[in-house]
Image: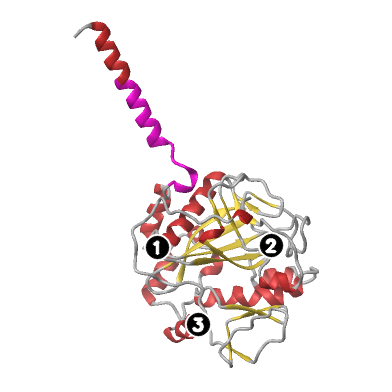
Amino acid sequence: MDLSIKRSVLIATAAVGVTLAGCSQVVPPHLKPIPPEAKALLAKKGMREDAPIFIRIFKEENELEIWKAKDDGRFHYFKTYPICNWSGKLGPKFKQGDKQAPEGFYRVSAKQMNPNSSFHLSFNLGYPNAFDKSHKRTGDYLMVHGDCKSAGCYAMTDALMEEIYAFAREAFAGGQEAFDVHAYPFRMTPENMRRHSKNKHYAFWRNNLYQGYKDFKKTKLPPKVDVCERRYLVNVGFTNGQAPDDPAAACPAYQRLPVEQIPRPPMFQEAQRKAPMSTVPQEQASSSPTPAAEASLSSGSTFGFAPPKPSVAGFAFRLNSTLSR
């Protein structure tokens, strides 16, 4: 072969190789797969990639937790992610511009996911929710996002946000319609509640958030949450069978749904004792619910299982122009 022709062929081949290599490496952040280390942890804990998720946020501890549903219908602790930055102080958000990160019970659907966020990736918490609106609280674009910068949001590093986003994406692809996010000022242990008892926001925490925290600890089920009389009602059933449609109006007659606690199976107890303390938050060593408790809460549970679907790395989220941050 003529030397000049051979050189041209080699150059063309190299160019194609470089192009293909580049294509294989350029994956948009919102389509990146769950990292291998996280996949290994899923396998170790017997969790599916596309199983429903539940998220808890703790300001004082600078932590975001992901919990994953298993086949028993309950949510099990998966992993804790350090929050890079959040703004404001302990306490709820009141108005636009106060730079407070929200506290409360929020719910995130696929349309609240933003793959084109100015802060790498984000999902909108849905503030103000019904409770916030009943108190005439204002503000918008309250997110969990990347970029490690916050003006009222919960900011993660870009790498951690990609992983969290991937878990949400796969959960939606698996059939979850929306996931709950509970944002707390701190882990609401009795000790922490006593320590913060003089805080001006203590009544809000004690009367509105504490019950949800306690019930999840007992049942490992995201609690049923309603709003009336401008307050959260956690795990209650209304005698007329209808939830209140006006968060500021008087509450219809209701009764507390039973929330039961039973010991874990002996084999699980033994495994729990042998597990390194760093692998599971200490507060999570609580008991599981009885089948009766699960049945009593199932009508208000905020997740639903669908037949397993293939993982869809390219799951397309329907964007809302008002959630463009």
For the residues carrying marks 3 and 1, which lies nearer the camera in this image?
Answer: 1
Q: Which of marks 2 and 1 is nearer the N terminus?
A: 2
The kind of secondary structure the magenta stretch mainly shows is: helix
Which segment did they paint magenta?
A: 13-32
Question: Please, what is the three-letter code of the amino acid marked with disc 1?
Answer: Gly
Number of marks present in the image shown: 3
Q: Position of residue 128 (x, y in %)?
A: 68, 65
Q: Earlier in the sequence, mark 3 or mark 1?
A: 1
Label 1, secondary structure: give it: loop
Residue that appears at 36% across and 58% down: 43
- Note whether 219 is above or below 163 in the view shown: below
Question: Please, what is the three-letter code of the amino acid marked with disc 3?
Answer: Leu
Q: Which of marks 2 and 3 is nearer the N terminus?
A: 2
Mark 2 → mark 3, Cα distance in angstroms = 26 Å
Question: Please, what is the three-letter code of the amino acid marked with disc 2?
Answer: Pro
Labels 3 and 1 touching (C-beta < 8 A): no
Label 2, secondary structure: give it: loop
Mark 2 packing: few (<14 Cα in 10 Å), some, or many (20+)?
many
Mark 3 packing: few (<14 Cα in 10 Å), some, or many (20+)?
many
Q: In which quarter of the image is residue 63?
A: bottom right
Residue denoted by label 2: 102
Residue that appears at 46% across and 56% down: 169
Mark 2 → mark 1, Cα distance in angstroms = 28 Å
Residue denoted by label 3: 297
Residue denoted by label 1: 174
Numbered tag placed on residue 270 in the rendering: none
